Amino acid sequence: MAVIVEDTIEIVVSNPQLNNTVTVTNPASKNTINVSQGYTASVGIPGQGGSGTVTQIIAADGLTGGVITTSGTIGLEDTDVDPGSYTLANITVDSKGRITSASNGSGTGGTDVTTDQVINITNNDAAFSHMTTPIASGTSLQSILIDMLQKYTLSTISLNALNVSFEDENGSYPDPSLNASNIITREVGGGVRVFGFQQSLSDDTSVQDNSVSFFQNGTLVEGGFSDVAAFGTLSQFIDLSPGVSTNVFNLTAIDDGGESNETISSNNKTIRFRFKVKVGASPLEVSDSNFQSVYDNLSTIHDELQLETTIFTTCNPDTNNASNFTYIVYPTSFGSVINGQYVGVTEVLQGAQPVTGAFTDHGPFVVTNSFGAQIEYNFFRTNDPGAFADGVVLTINF
């Protein structure tokens, strides 16, 4: 049974079964059908397969598309907001959740609050040992937090240069000057005087006042130098005695900015003495009477201050001259006694070819070098003149 009340059709079915279907044909445009649970309602116009038709859609506020009666497109209206990213944005949102205006904000994202009184750090935990107490009134809380979370880093000290004077060959010492070389090499016999140093510290405020000390070969020379001054002058210069020795200098200071005092050390500067070794040519056959002349006037292809190390040198026209002998002049101390016999030069190679047998060792002779030092030298001389052609490479081992 169907009952029509104004625009509503109420259908009553006696003895209903599951999955019943109720169909209303030629409904009025405003008909409403109430269907109880378990029923399916089908509303349609005869000959159109029971399908319905939407007759009108009206785009609501904020949508585009107008009134659609057949087909069309509904979209969102543009706002006055420029698309993009905003920093610390100021925005306006309407009642429907749309952003209707946006602009960049100003500032740093918040006010950095400062303290209004002095803060004393009384906590003895190591985590606070690097912080300075008291903290002054008006200090930024942000800077306090950064300081609190930052691990303390020790200061560094650098030995930038030594203030030195090198002895002239006439025995005098000129005014000292700064030498920044990491390694200074001097010939045995040539004196060196050390007058002071140049330094730098990464943070002298974290270094104990006047705690800079000057060391030579690990032994304290003098302490109490300023940690602020760029230069330190020794109360008495160090006179390095000529000899085959190496002198290593460095600085230390006390960093007292952390939980406990820490000794910081600088880089090293080295002054060392070396013997001169010569390889070259001379028309003289060395003897007790002319060894000094051979030493002084040798036409050299190698003239270096060095230790007892391998030499690589290239011959020239002088070693190829039929009037000249080739010499290897070296300190007698380079050699050693093997099976009761002194051996200085152990091997000479011409390219890969051994030519040690082409030489005879002469000496030792006490040579006086340019600084007046008297040193025993041996003269390893070729048996024949003009022994090595121009461009030949010699390898010499001691």
Image: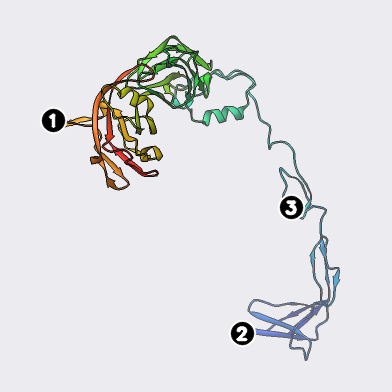
Q: Which residue is drawn at 37% across and 39% down?
A: 321
Q: Which residue lies furthest to the front in this view?
A: 323
Within-10-Å neighbours for mark 2: few <14, some 14–19, many 20+: few
Q: Which residue is at the far top?
A: 235
Establish if 68 lies above or below 235: below
Q: Which amino acid does label 3 sit on?
A: Gly
The secondary structure type at the circle numbered 2 is loop
Q: Report x, y in % for residue 305.
A: 37, 28
Q: Give whichever of discs 3 and 1 has the lower sequence position.
A: 3
Tell me the residue at 77%/55% (across/down).
Answer: 96
Q: What element carries label 3?
A: loop
Identify the residue under disc 3. Answer: 84
Q: Which of 178 and 335 is in front in this view?
A: 335
Mark linked to residue 17: 2
Foreground residue, 142 or 202?
A: 202
Please name the residue shown 13% across and 33% down the image. Answer: 339
Whether residue 121 is visible: no
Callout 2, which amino acid?
Gln
Relative vertical location of residue 7 with respect to residue 46 in this rendering, above or below: above
First reached walking from the N terminus: tag 1 or tag 2 = 2
Q: Which residue type does callout 1 highlight?
A: Gly
Q: Please provide percent x and percent y for residue 183.
A: 42, 27
Q: Distance between the residues labelled 3 and 1?
A: 93 Å
**What is the crowding at mark 1: few (fewer than 14 residues within 10 Å), some, or many (at least 20)?**
few
Frontmost residue, 236 versus 104: 236
Disc 1: which residue: 340
> Depth-wise, is mark 1 or mark 2 nearer the camera?
1
Query: In front: 398, or 10?
Result: 398
Q: Distance between the residues labelled 2 and 3?
A: 61 Å
